[in-house]
Structure formats: structure tokens, C-alpha cells
């Protein structure tokens, strides 16, 4: 299965979904979907790396924590991210996210994401062996 990300409709908010051959790939693709809510990820240069770590008792909560950690880093560093490398083990996620400072003319940000929610939160292995990670983000 090829990795991919997508959005799905959810009332006034937006759903982000990542799919991939591994749980890590699904988390990475969902992070790209998160960036795509704000701007075109193709316009974001992976110039600077930021290390992100979080932990949770299950995959779904870990996924939500991962997205909220990214949202926090975007807000406090005024950055957008376009490349991700996620490592998961023993209820812990360690990742590197590469991006650049927001440039309004270059990135044309559409909205600000307030946070990842538990609405439609789902992380699971699909029948074909691939992984899905999704939730709704509050915009």
C-alpha cells in the first residue's frame, strides 16, 4: 500500500487521516494532512529539524498527543512542517519534523489549527495489513 494523507468533512472542523504500511507511516501522513489544513505542504521547505517526543497509554491517545505536539510547535516556533520521521515503541513516540518559518506570501496560510480532538479518533491496522490514523482537528 502506498502512503497517503487525506481530509474528511466533520461539521465546522476538518478531519485529518494518514494511511501507510506501518503505524509510523500513518502518523507521518496524518502530520502532512495537518500541515495541508493550513498550507500546501509542497510549498514548505524542510530546512530545519525539530525534535518532538510524547507518550500515552495507547495508540489513539499517542496519535492525538503527536498532532497536538505538532500544533504547539507550529504555534510557538511560527513554523510549518513538511517532512516527518516517526519512531514508536513502548507507548512512546519520538519524531523529527522538518520545516521552515511561516512566510505569509509563500505559504498563504488558510486557517489556524486550535488542536486535535478525540472526535473520530481512530488508530488501527486495516484488513490488508496497512495502518490508519485519523481524528478531527479544531480550526
Image (cartoon, rainbow, N blue to C red):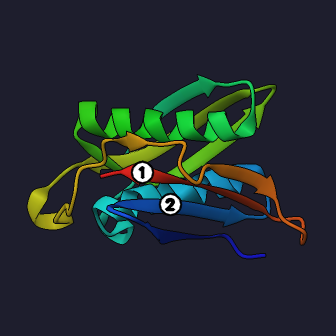
In the rendered view, does 88 fall on the left or right side of 35?
right
Q: Are marks 1 and 2 in contact (CB under 8 Å)?
A: yes
The reply to whether residue 47 is visible in this rendering is no
Point out which mark residue 16 bears.
Answer: 2
- Residue at the location (30% across, 48% down)? 113
- Residue at the location (14% across, 55% down)? 103
Viewer-side residue, 34 vs 84 = 34
Residue farthest toward the front in the current orientation of the protein: 11
Viewer-side residue, 87 vs 137 = 137
Across and down, in percent, residue 86 comes to 64, 43
Across and down, in percent, residue 78 comes to 22, 39
Q: Of the residues under marks 1 and 2, which one precedes in the sequence?
A: 2
Across and down, in percent, residue 100 comes to 29, 48
Q: Which residue is mark 1?
A: 137
Viewer-side residue, 37 vs 93 = 37
In the rendered view, does 119 fall on the left or right side of 111?
right
Characterize the local packing of mark 2: few (<14), some (14-19) or many (20 or more) Cα atoms within 10 angstroms: many
Amino acid at each position: 500500500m502506498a502512503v497517503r494523507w487525506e481530509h474528511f468533512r466533520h461539521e465546522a472542523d476538518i478531519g485529518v487521516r494518514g494511511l501507510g504500511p506501518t503505524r509510523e507511516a500513518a502518523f507521518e501522513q496524518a502530520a502532512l494532512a495537518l500541515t495541508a489544513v493550513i498550507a500546501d505542504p509542497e510549498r514548505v521547505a524542510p530546512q530545519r529539524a525539530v525534535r518532538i517526543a510524547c507518550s500515552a497509554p495507547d495508540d489513539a491517545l499517542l496519535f492525538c498527543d503527536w498532532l497536538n505536539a505538532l500544533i504547539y510547535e507550529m504555534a510557538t516556533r511560527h513554523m510549518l512542517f513538511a517532512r516527518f520521521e516517526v519512531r514508536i515503541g513502548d507507548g512512546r513516540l519520538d519524531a523529527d519534523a522538518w520545516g521552515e518559518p511561516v512566510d505569509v506570501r509563500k505559504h498563504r496560510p488558510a486557517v489556524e489549527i486550535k488542536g486535535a480532538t478525540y472526535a473520530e479518533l481512530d488508530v488501527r491496522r486495516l484488513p490488508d495489513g496497512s495502518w490508519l490514523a485519523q481524528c478531527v482537528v479544531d480550526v
